[in-house]
Image (tube, rainbow, N blue to C red):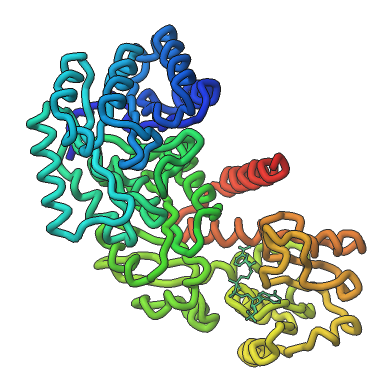
Amino acid sequence: MATESLFGEDRICGVVAARTTREMWQQLRAAVRDTRTVELRLDWLKSEQELQVFLARLRRAKFGRRVTLIATYRRIEAGGHFSKGVTGQLAVLRRAIAAGCEWIDLEIESVQASAGFTRGLCFAGARQILSFHDFAKTPKKSGLARLSRRLERTAKAAGFDAVKIATRCDSIAESLRVLALAHGKRNVIAVPMGEIATSARILMLREGSALAYAPVEVATAPGQVPLAEMTRLYRANKLDRQTRVYGVIGDPIEHSLSPVLHNTGFAARRVNAVYLPFLVRYLGDFVAAIELLGIAGFSVTIPHKEHIVRYLDDCDALAAQIGAVNTVVVRGQGKLFGYNTDYVGVLRALERRMPIAGSRVLILGAGGAARAVAFALARGGAAVAICARRMERAQRLARAIRGEAIPRRALRHEFFDAIVNATPVGMHPQTSDSPLEGRELNCRLVFDTIYRPQRTKLLQLAAGRGIETVSGLDMFLAQGIAQWEIWMGERAPEAAMGRAVVAALRREEKGRDKK
Ligand code: NAP
């Protein structure tokens, strides 16, 4: 485990990368609100003139006294933008040192090409990171260890202070092997790259990496987590061996709001726990990493809700009946226990608006969400009708809950207390679609399980006809709060969690409107 940091207090390094001095400066100012360690990707500046102006401004501002600045002028061969040779690269790095950068980052290819120049940089008083990137793969087990030893030897011989190893990972297991390179070392920065490695990036500092990189605006490597999220949402610099790890598994996962929901709950109750997004293509890869990552519980989303059942040691009876699990608790000796809280979410969203017992409800769709809704309502005493584009699926679900399957053409002549959309029709980005037309909405209440956008086309049509509407956000919040309470064994700070999710959705919607 690292003892004293090489980079001062802030081991989350904000990455500043832009084409113009103006944008670069804006990013730098934004970065220092969250961290006092910043990498300047000078190779991103579009011309020598921009570079000159930026460095002159940097020198005048004397940022280097308050912030640990790392200058990088990456060549194309190592994933950067600078197209010329090592001599030109080193000349720019020297100017960056003169402008106040305490550290420089130099790739192994440049060092091998020109060891003499490197020593010159030492004399200029800068501290140096020797970096290695492989954007295509992570070497196999023994190859990775050999690579790490070779880099550490080269760094020592050439007078470097730290080593950075960044490789592309295609599985969680690979990202863990990369993280392990930093265990017990003070001067190794281990960077698992790729979208699968996002959660590993958040755990980098906990695993002993000397730094964790986070872009202020534009990602400079795949799988990076933005600086504001890294520091505020995940508190990546506060995670330690005692931190309990939770997360959500799915594919895709990057737009999940569950990290906002759960991490807000942990922060409000001051629980030493973190909730991470895991992009999981193969369930087996994730399940094998549960113990190594110290995962205490996880949420399950599309497309794993049904397949996860076969990896469980035990399952709540109702979840087994529904045939889908969205919540897993990891018990002693890594035993997995499954629940379905979508079920709870549906009931909490609906029961305060209508009496469920004795009502007649139409459910659109026959997939995972539709099954949870159907079981919840049928158990609550509602008469449930299912309408799905594949009649045999609708019939199968209807049989399981002792309800009826109903063809779409019959809807205009039927009346329901509530209609529930459990299909993805109308979900962002196809927001102008609706699963039903206005004249098919013969009901008192319409509930759309979709929460992006909050006001779907279906809900707009319903509101236009004076029908009460319920957004999927209510269900999302209720199912997540039920998960939190299962894991924590105490009441969740519902209000704070809800506010954080609503604010995140608003920011998203505003961002989309701007575009
Ligand atoms: P799923 O298992 O893939 O099921 C989707 C269902 O919708 C299937 O019956 C599918 O029919 C049907 N469908 C898909 N595209 C359709 C189309 N163009 N026209 C008509 N029917 C269509 O997915 P899921 O997990 O149930 O999720 C469904 C929705 O529920 C998603 O929008 C999700 O956001 C929402 N949800 C919300 C929450 C919440 O907390 N608010 C929780 C879970 C799910 P086929 O079987 O014929 O493909």
Count the labels in the image: 0
Image quadrant in which you'd find residue 206: top left
Question: Looking at the figure, which quarter contains the N terminus?
Answer: top left
Q: Position of residue 41 (x, y in %)?
A: 39, 30
Residue 442 appears left or right of 325:
right
Residue at image position (9%, 32%) is 156
Q: Position of residue 66 (x, y in %)?
A: 37, 14
Residue extending farthest to the top is: 60
Residue at image position (37%, 28%) is 39
Question: Looking at the figure, which quarter contains the C terminus?
Answer: top right
Q: Position of residue 242 (x, y in %)?
A: 28, 46
- Which sits in the foreground, 198 or 15? 15
Residue at image position (34%, 60%) is 170
- Which sits in the foreground, 152 or 469? 152
The relative height of residue 457 versus residue 387 in the rendered view (above or below) is: above
Asked whether residue 192 is in view, the answer is yes
Image quadrant in which you'd find residue 149: top left
The relative height of residue 483 versus residue 22 in the rendered view (above or below) is: below
Q: Which quadrant of the picture is home to ligand 1?
A: bottom right
The relative height of residue 250 versus residue 411 in the rendered view (above or below) is: above
Asked whether residue 293 is in view, the answer is no
Q: Position of residue 387 (x, y in %)?
A: 74, 83
Residue 98 appears left or right of 119:
right
